[in-house]
C-alpha cells in the first residue's frame, strides 16, 4: 500500500483537480464564527486555522459546541456571524473534498450491506446518479480500506457483523474513499478499548504524514489524543486556548474550561 501515491493523486473523478497545496499551507480558516441554536449561544467568536497534513484535536466539556463546529465546517449549519473558508470550497457550493464522520455511527448485524459496499458509498457523489462504479472507483475504495487496515477477510462480510474497532475503520475508509482532503471526525474512537483506540490513532497519523490529508478530531480522551495531534483547541462555547499538546495540558485555561480546581485531575 503506497500512501504517498494517494497524496500525489490530485485528480478527482469529476475531472477537476484538487488545489496543489504547499507543505504547511492553510486548508481551512475559521474567522469569528458565532452560532446560536434554539435561542442559546453555542459558539462565540471562534477563530483558528488548519494546515495541510495537520491533525488538530478539539476538546472541551459536553455541550461545549464541538459537534456544532464540525457541522458548520461541513456546511450543515450556517454561522450567524463570521466566516468559514477552505481551499477546497468554491463560493456558493458545498465542498466535495471535506469528509464528515458524525458521532455514534453504527449498523445492526442484519443490515444487508457488505463492508466493501459501505466503503464504496463514499464514492457515490463522485460516481453520479444512475452510474456504475468504474475501475478507478474500485481502486480508490480498496486503497482506502488498505490505508485504514481493514482486513481483506472482512471486505465481503456484513458490516453490521464487524467488531466496534473494525466498524470504525470501515466508516473512516468510506470517508477517505471519497477523495476528501479534510476529514472532520467526531469521536471516531468512541467506546473502543485502549489498544484498539491507540491503533486507530496511529493509523490516522500515518495517513496524514504520507498523504497530506488534514484532520480535525473531536475526542473526550484528552491525554490519549494529546499523543496523536499536532495541536489542541480547547473550547466551551468560546475558544479558551490553542497550542502544542504539552503546553495546553499544563495551561490554566484548560482547567478553567473544564471547571477544575487545582486539586482536580484531568483524564
Image (cartoon, helix red, strand yellow):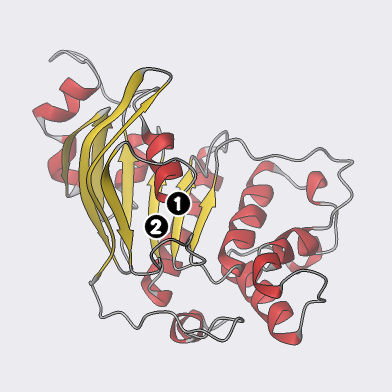
* Residue at 81% from the left image edge and 37% from the top image edge: 108
**Vertical placement of residue 200 versus 77, above or below:** below
* Residue at 72% from the left image edge and 44% from the top image edge: 163
* Residue at 52% from the left image edge and 66% from the top image edge: 96
The residue closer to the viewer here, 167 or 86, is: 86
Relative to 142, is 225 on the left or the right? left
* Residue at 47% from the left image edge and 84% from the top image edge: 17
Q: Are marks 2 and 1 in contact (CB under 8 Å)?
A: yes
The residue closer to the viewer here, 29 or 231, is: 29
Mark pair 2, 1: CA separation: 6 Å
Which secondary structure lies at badge 2? Answer: strand
Q: Position of residue 261 (x, y in %)?
A: 16, 13
- When asked about the image quadrant of residue 220, the answer is top left
**Vertical placement of residue 235 versus 109, above or below:** above
Report which residue position mark 1 lands on: 184
Report which residue position mark 2 lands on: 215
**Vertical placement of residue 39 versus 192, above or below:** above
Q: Position of residue 86 (x, y in %)?
A: 34, 63
The residue closer to the viewer here, 163 or 103, is: 103
Amino acid at each position: 500500500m503506497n500512501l504517498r501515491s494517494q497524496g500525489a493523486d490530485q485528480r478527482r473523478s469529476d475531472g477537476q483537480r484538487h488545489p496543489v497545496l504547499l507543505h504547511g499551507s492553510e486548508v481551512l480558516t475559521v474567522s469569528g464564527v458565532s452560532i446560536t441554536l434554539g435561542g442559546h449561544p453555542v459558539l462565540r467568536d471562534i477563530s483558528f486555522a488548519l494546515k495541510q497534513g495537520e491533525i488538530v484535536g478539539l476538546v472541551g466539556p459536553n455541550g461545549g459546541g464541538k459537534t456544532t463546529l464540525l457541522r458548520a465546517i461541513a456546511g450543515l449549519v450556517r454561522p450567524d456571524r463570521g466566516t468559514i473558508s477552505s481551499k477546497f470550497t468554491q463560493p456558493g457550493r458545498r465542498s466535495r473534498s471535506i469528509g464528515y464522520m458524525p458521532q455514534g455511527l453504527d449498523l445492526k448485524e442484519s443490515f444487508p450491506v457488505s463492508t466493501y459496499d459501505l466503503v464504496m458509498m463514499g464514492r457515490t457523489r463522485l460516481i453520479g446518479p444512475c452510474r456504475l462504479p468504474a475501475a478507478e472507483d474500485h481502486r480508490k475504495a480498496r486503497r482506502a480500506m488498505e490505508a485504514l487496515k481493514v482486513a481483506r477477510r472482512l471486505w465481503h462480510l456484513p458490516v453490521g457483523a464487524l467488531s466496534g474497532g473494525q466498524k470504525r475503520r470501515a466508516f473512516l475508509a468510506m470517508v477517505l474513499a471519497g477523495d476528501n482532503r479534510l476529514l472532520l471526525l467526531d469521536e471516531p474512537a468512541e467506546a473502543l478499548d485502549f489498544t484498539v483506540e491507540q491503533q486507530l490513532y496511529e493509523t490516522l497519523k500515518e495517513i496524514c504524514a504520507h498523504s497530506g490529508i488534514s484532520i480535525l478530531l473531536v475526542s473526550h480522551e484528552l491525554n490519549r489524543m494529546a499523543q496523536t495531534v499536532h495541536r489542541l483547541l480547547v473550547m466551551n462555547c468560546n475558544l479558551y486556548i490553542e497550542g502544542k499538546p504539552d503546553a495546553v495540558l499544563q495551561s490554566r485555561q484548560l482547567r478553567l474550561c473544564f471547571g477544575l480546581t487545582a486539586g482536580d485531575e484531568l483524564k
